[in-house]
Amino acid sequence: MKHFRRVQDAWPENCRFTDVRVRKRGSPHMSEEFMRTARHRGLPHVRCGDRVRVNGATGAIVGHDACANFEVIFDEGSRYAGKTRSCHPTQLELLPWQDAC
């Protein structure tokens, strides 16, 4: 099996990262470091995959960074569409399950 670090390595002909759609089978993986960040930030219930709104743009939590912020990938149609941003926990508005879809 081949692994590519960049989309352009597999499809060099004008393929953008946002052109690729994938799905993961099973629940999102959360490392112990992610759980420690969530506890440190006072949000022990937050999990990877939780839907959030940041400055009016919706997305999903996909990880954390060394600054104890959460990484959020934003939905198509939002002003940060397809981008992953480091977001301070005070910027996050957790969305109820029915509002997340």
Image (cartoon, grey):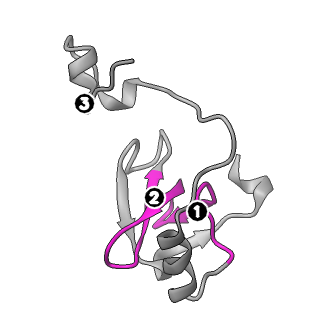
Observer-side mark, 2 or 1, equals 2
Along the line of sight, the residue nearer the viewer: 12 or 91: 12
Which stretch appears magenta? Answer: 45-73
Instruction: Please report whichever mark, 2 or 3, sits nearer to the chain's N-terminal start.
Output: 3
Along the line of sight, the residue nearer the viewer: 18 or 6: 6
User: Which residue is under mark 1?
Assistant: 52
Helix, strand, or loop for circle 1?
strand
- Residue 47: which quarter of the image? bottom right
Q: Identify which residue is drawn at 58% across, 53% down.
A: 29
Q: x, y percentage for residue 55?
A: 45, 67
Mark 2 Cα within 10 Å, few/some/many (few <14, many 20+)?
many
- Residue 26: which quarter of the image? top right
Q: Is residue 65 left or right of residue 21?
A: left
Instruction: Please report whichever mark, 2 or 1, sits nearer to the chain's N-terminal start.
Output: 1
Q: Identify which residue is drawn at 61% across, 50% down.
A: 28
User: Which residue is under mark 2?
Assistant: 72
Helix, strand, or loop for circle 3?
loop
Circles 2 and 1, Cβ within 8 Å, touching? The answer is: yes
Task: Name the disc covering residue 6, or none.
Answer: 3
Q: Which amino acid does label 1 sit on?
A: Val
Task: Name the disc covering residue 63, or none.
Answer: none
Q: Which amino acid does label 3 sit on?
A: Arg
Q: Identify which residue is drawn at 59% across, 35% down.
A: 24
Q: Identify which residue is drawn at 48% across, 66% down.
A: 54
**Residue 14 is covered by the magenta coloring:** no
What is the residue that sits farthest to the front in this orientation? Answer: 1
Helix, strand, or loop for circle 2?
strand
